[in-house]
Amino acid sequence: MEFRKDFIEKLKTAKSVVFFTGAGMSAESGIPTFRGEGGIWNKLNPEELANFSAFLKNPDMVWEWYQYRRNIINQNQPNAGHYAIAEMEKYFNKVTVVTQNVDNLHTRAGSKKVLELHGNIERNFCVDCNKFDYSPELNQSQKVPRCRHCGGLIRPDVVWFGEMLPQEIFAEAESVSRKADLFFVIGTSAVVYPAAYIPLNAKSSGAYIVEINVDETDISETVNYSIKGKAGEILPKILKLLDKKK
């Protein structure tokens, strides 16, 4: 495929780059999305599984569902798009991944600076003392574990409905986005707020916005360049342009 000349020029001169990724990025690795055809929310009621009240009411059921999700993630691997993003760190002064995904695939692919807006399903913490527990065996348990420090319930470190995003991470994501020369919006409908403010803030601060998505989205008309297709196919081609630049 041929890329637009203004995009190629921006790619050559950019120093700070941000990749803002959503569920579509992970879907290419076989991780079910929450919305759309085949989305996991179509089969289960999120209000019964992804809020704190539901967890307190039936912790074992919620924990079992998250174990099911972890198993899916562990059975799949980062795709070519994830690896291409990690490789791009060689070509720019600063590369930051801001992701709405909780599956840890960007880190597994080798990206060094990943800001997780909605948490990480591989981490767990106690609802009483807030201490994190990184014991690998936790993610094998079929019943909700108890904290080894205080006996409280252990929950996944993901943002549930009704909870705020981690404020320090969100603030850092906003900061790097405002300073970005080039900003990619990948595999997201960009309709979930407050995360959806981030690409809008990047554009208002002067960043060149590139969308990569298999479908047209609400943000398609506001970006500088919308590329229709799979991230796993398009990002490696962009990486080849950078190889020529080197």
Image (spheres, helix red, strand yellow):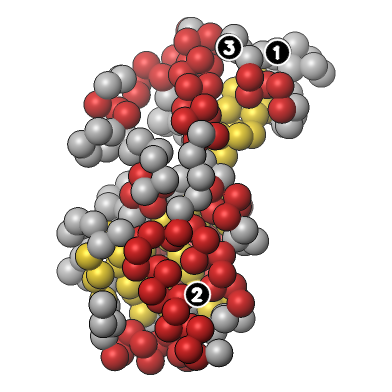
Look at the numbered disc 2 and give the secondary structure of its residue. strand
- Picture coordinates of residue 97 (x, y %)? 52, 61
Dividing the image into 4 quarters, which one contains the C terminus?
A: bottom right
> Left or right of 13: which side holds 167?
right
Q: CA distance from mark 3 to mark 1?
A: 12 Å
- Picture coordinates of residue 203 (x, y %)? 35, 74
In front of the other: 30 or 133: 30
Q: Residues within 10 Å of mark 2 (few under 14, many from 20)?
A: many
Residue that appears at 30% across and 64% down: 212
Tell which circle, 2 or 3, labels the residue nearer the N-terminal end: 2
Residue that appears at 44% across and 79% down: 240
Of circles 2 and 3, the one toward us is 3
Quarter holding residue 141 = top right
Residue that appears at 27% across and 52% down: 189
Image position of 194 with respect to 87: above or below: above
Of circles 3 and 1, the one toward us is 3
Residue 226 seen in the figure: yes
Q: Amino acid at mark 2?
A: Val
Outermost residue toward the right?
149
The residue to which callout 3 is attached is 142
Q: Amino acid at mark 3?
A: Gln
The residue to which callout 1 is attached is 146
> Left or right of 241: which side holds 134?
right
Name the mark on residue 17.
2
Q: Residues within 10 Å of mark 1 (few under 14, many from 20)?
A: some
